[in-house]
Amino acid sequence: MNETPTKILLVDDEIDVLRLLSIRLNASGYEVVTAESGEQALAQLSVSRPNLVITDLRMDGMDGMALFDAIQQSNTTLPVILLTAHGSIPDAIDATNRGVFSFLTKPWDSQTLLDHIQKALSLTGNGIPAPTEVGDEDWRQGIITRSSLMEDLLVQANMVAASETSVLIHGDSGTGKELLAQAIHRASPRRNQPFVPVNCGAIPETLLESELFGHAKGAFTGATRDYEGLFQAAHQGTLFLDEIGDMPLALQVKLLRVLQEKAIRPVGSTKTIPVDVRMISATHRDLEYELEQANFREDLYYRLNVVTLELPNLAARREDIPLLATHFLTRLSSDNSKQVTGFAPEAMEFLVRASWPGNVRQLLNVVEQTFALTTTPIISAMLVRKALREKPGELLTFADAKRRFEQEYLVQLLQITNGNVSRAARMAKRNRTEFYKLLHRHQIDPGLFKPSRVSDN
C-alpha cells in the first residue's frame, strides 16, 4: 500500500509566513494545509484531519493559545507547536505547562523546526505506523464515520491498541462499544488470536462465574464434564467484558484476583490455570457513581480503567447519520432481492434531526423498518416519521448559540449537506444570503466540505 503522507495544519495570519513554511515542509515530505486564523483552523480540523498543528501565537481574533485550548476540548492527542516573534520565557512556560508540545521563537532554524515536528509525531503516534501497517484501515472495518469526535476517538483507540493496557469503553447503549473493542483488538499485536465477547448483564449471576472461569466435572448438578471458560477461550487474545457495571460484587473480587495473578481456578477445581488475556471492558453506567454507592469495587475499577475511551452518542455525531443510514440501506438491498436506492431529501432531514435515544442500534432499526415497508425505490418522509414515532427534534438556533458553538454548528451543517449551502441554510432556517454572511464571519469555506474534498481525507 502507498504510504499516506503526514498532514500538518499551518496557522498564521501572515500569508508570506504560510507560503514559506509550506514550501519547506512540502520539501520535507509533509502534506500541508493552511489557515489564516484560529477560527478558520477549527473549520479545517473537521475536514483535513491533520496529524500536527503549527500555529502562530499572536493573531487577530483567536490567538494560538485560544486555538490550542479549543483543540484540547475535542482532541487531546493532537500535538500543537507554537511559533512567535514575541517569544518570552513566561510565554513558553505557560504554553508547555498547559500541554503545548513545544514553543519556538521566530526566526527559527528550519532543521530545529523539523526536529520538533518529528519528535512530536514520534511521541504521540500521529502519522506513523504503530500497531497497524501504514494505510491499513482493516482494523476499523465496520465503523462508518466522518465525525471529528469519532475520528479523534479512533486515533486514541489505535494508539492504545499497541500496548497491553486495560481499556474501559464508556458509552450509551447502542453506540457500538463492542465494535470499538473489536477494532482495538484488530489493531493490536493479538489480532491473530481470539476475540471473546461476554455480556455480563445477559448471563444469570449463578452461571456467570462458570462461564468466565470454567468448571470441573461434578462441580454442580449438570456438570457432566470439564468446561473451559471464556478466559481460557481468550488465551493469548482479548476478552471483552461488556456491561462490566452489571457484574455482581462477589464475582468482582474473583475477577480482580484473576487480573492480579494472571491465573484462573475453575469452579469446583483445586488447580489454577495460567491465562494470558488483554482486557477490554465497557459500560453505559457511571462507574464513579457506582463506586460511591458501593456497587463496584474501587480496586477493580482502577485495574480496568487504565485508559477510558468515551464513545459519543449518535446525537453528538449527526454528520454520520446520512452515511450510516445509506450504509445500512445498501447492505439491506444487497442481502435482499428488493432494490431500494435511497431516502427522499425530507426523509433524510427527519433522520438527521431525530433525538436518537437508542443511538446507532435505533437508526439501524428505523432503516430496516422503512426498507421493509417501502413500495418505492426511494424511502419517503412519511415512512421515516412513522418509524421514528416522535416529532423530529430541532437543531439549536443561531440566536441561542455562542460564538464557538455557532462555528461548530455551521461546520456540522456543512458536513451533513456535503457543502450544499442552500440545503444547509434551509436546515438552519436562515435565508441563503444571511447564511453566507455567517460563513464569512466564521471564515468557513463551504468548498472544504464538498464530497471530492472529504473523500481525499
Image: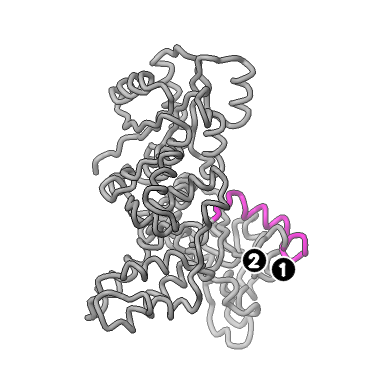
Residue 261 rendering spot, x and y as whole percentages? 64, 55
According to the image, label 2 marks what residue?
245
Q: Nearer the viewer, residue 99 or 304?
A: 99
| Residue at mark 1 to residue at mark 2: CA–CA distance | 10 Å
Q: Is residue 267 left or right of residue 67?
A: right
Task: Tell me which amino acid carries mark 2.
Answer: Gly
* Figure quadrant of residue 246: bottom right
Find disc 1 in the rendering and name its residue. 249
Residue closest to the far right: 293
Q: Amino acid at mark 1?
A: Leu
Q: In this view of the protein, which residue sits in the foreground, 202 or 405? A: 405
From the viewer's perspective, tell me whether residue 293 is left or right of residue 51. Answer: right
Q: Which residues are magenta?
A: 290-310
The answer, for residue 212, to whether it is visible in the render is yes
Picture colour scheme: one colour
Q: Secondary structure at mark 1?
A: helix
Residue drawn at x 41%, y 48% is: 435
Q: Residue at x 45, y 67 (%)?
A: 360
- Work out which quarter of the rendered image holds the C terminus and state it: top left
Q: Is residue 414 above or below residue 65?
A: below
C-beta proximity under 8 Å, tags 1 and 2: no
Residue at the outermost bottom position:
221
**Residue found at x 62% / y 67%:** 265
Mark 2 lies on a secondary structure that is helix
